[in-house]
Amino acid sequence: MGVSRTQVVKFIRKGDTGDKGEQGAVLRGPQAWSDCATGYAFQAGKEGEQWKDVVMYNNNYYACIKSHTKTASNYPGSTTDRNNGYWQLGDKIELVATKLLLAAYALVENLGVEAIEMKDSSGNVVFKAKDGTVTCKTGTFNNITVQSGNIAGFKVSGNGLTNDPFTNDAYIIFRNDSMGAFAGIGGNILPATSGARGVARFENHDDTDEWGLGVNYAALVSARGSRDNRALQIDGGAVSGFALKNTVISSSGTVNLTRYDYNVIAINDSDLTLVLPIMQLYDDGHVIRIKRLGNGALKLRMNYCYTYNGTSSRYSRPALIYNQDATLTGTNTLNFESKCDAMELVWCRDIIRTVGNTSYYGLWIQYKLPRDW
């Protein structure tokens, strides 16, 4: 036999969708009162108005509560303002509730925003972060690590910078115009007026002798540490405007030459002995040219030199080969036979010369130059 049951079920009928309400006013500002020109139309955000204005005046924030046009006399707190009720001192709760936080200083432990901007004292935007893009027009940055992106015509690539794309003339230039100094590398660092194209330019045209050295250097190139070293390699092209340093010696006695003396010109009137410089392991191929122009006798003597001894080095006197395979050793001297006699000496580190039972490591080799003209 079945059982039946009667129960009351309550429900609420869903009403019809009402008309869409009018969009509310959008907050505008805060703007500095002085930045708004006379005649500027302030809005209070009433029905039918697009904006709700907030201005800054005397370090306070004021919200517009009655739409009006700016004049010279209706600034916040003025008699005109009080008589007409144009402005209301900003209420902190109201400003936060309307999505605007106004504060002289705010310390926030964690902050997540969709957009942020900063203005200078003149109201110009100097920093802006919006839609995933940051724009900064000024600032001081310390301890910055850049892992990707671009700097002018350069792209951050691994541990360095490279021009991107490889079709631009990105360059780096360091210059001090007051001292006539210029150093630059890049796709083209020569001025258009030069009528040429170059990827490196180093100039030192200082005419003030700022450092008291009496000499200007444009570049220092050095290669050391390996058995064979190349300080400069030219794989093509000519060298123009080439010059080599002169060393003019007028004194007598004994003068020790250095590895920076190349064109040595002796104009001595009394006896002079030139001592060749000490050659280092990285000096293989070093060249010295000597010319006798003085009336005094001129002699040449060798110094000690470094040569390889397996994986280490030795320090000893080398030999010098001159004329028809003659050998100069020890502290013996080589005479320049007459006035205008000249010779070029080339240091060969890895040649061994044996004279009798003695081996000499390293050789100075004489290239004889014309003597009588």
Image (cartoon, rainbow, N blue to C red):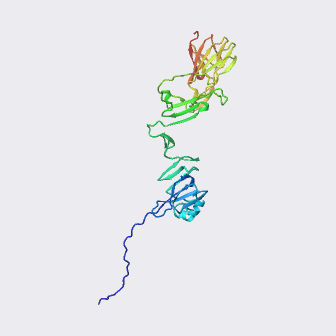
- Give the farthest residue toward the bottom: 1
Which is more toward the observer, 90 or 167? 90
Q: Residue 336: x and y, percent?
A: 63, 13
The quarter holding residue 349 reads top right
- Give the farthest residue toward the left: 1
Q: Quadrant of the N terminus?
A: bottom left
Regarding residue 95, the answer to whether it shows in the image is yes
Regarding residue 228, the answer to whether it shows in the image is no
- Give the farthest residue toward the top: 372
Q: Residue 189: x and y, percent?
A: 51, 32
Numbered disc total: 0
Residue at (47% x, 36% y) in the render: 169
Q: Residue 179: x and y, percent?
A: 61, 31
Q: Quadrant of the C terminus?
A: top right
Residue at (57% x, 49% y) in the render: 122
Q: As drawn, is 218 to the left or to the right of 158? A: right
Which is more toward the observer, 373 or 203? 203
Q: Residue 252: x and y, percent?
A: 70, 16
User: Is residue 348 placed above or below 82 in the rendered structure?
Assistant: above
Which is more toward the observer, 282 or 294? 294
Q: As drawn, is 330 to the left or to the right of 167? A: right
User: Is residue 241 placed above or below 171 in the rendered structure?
Assistant: above
Which is more toward the observer, 157 or 38? 38
The quarter holding residue 270 reads top right
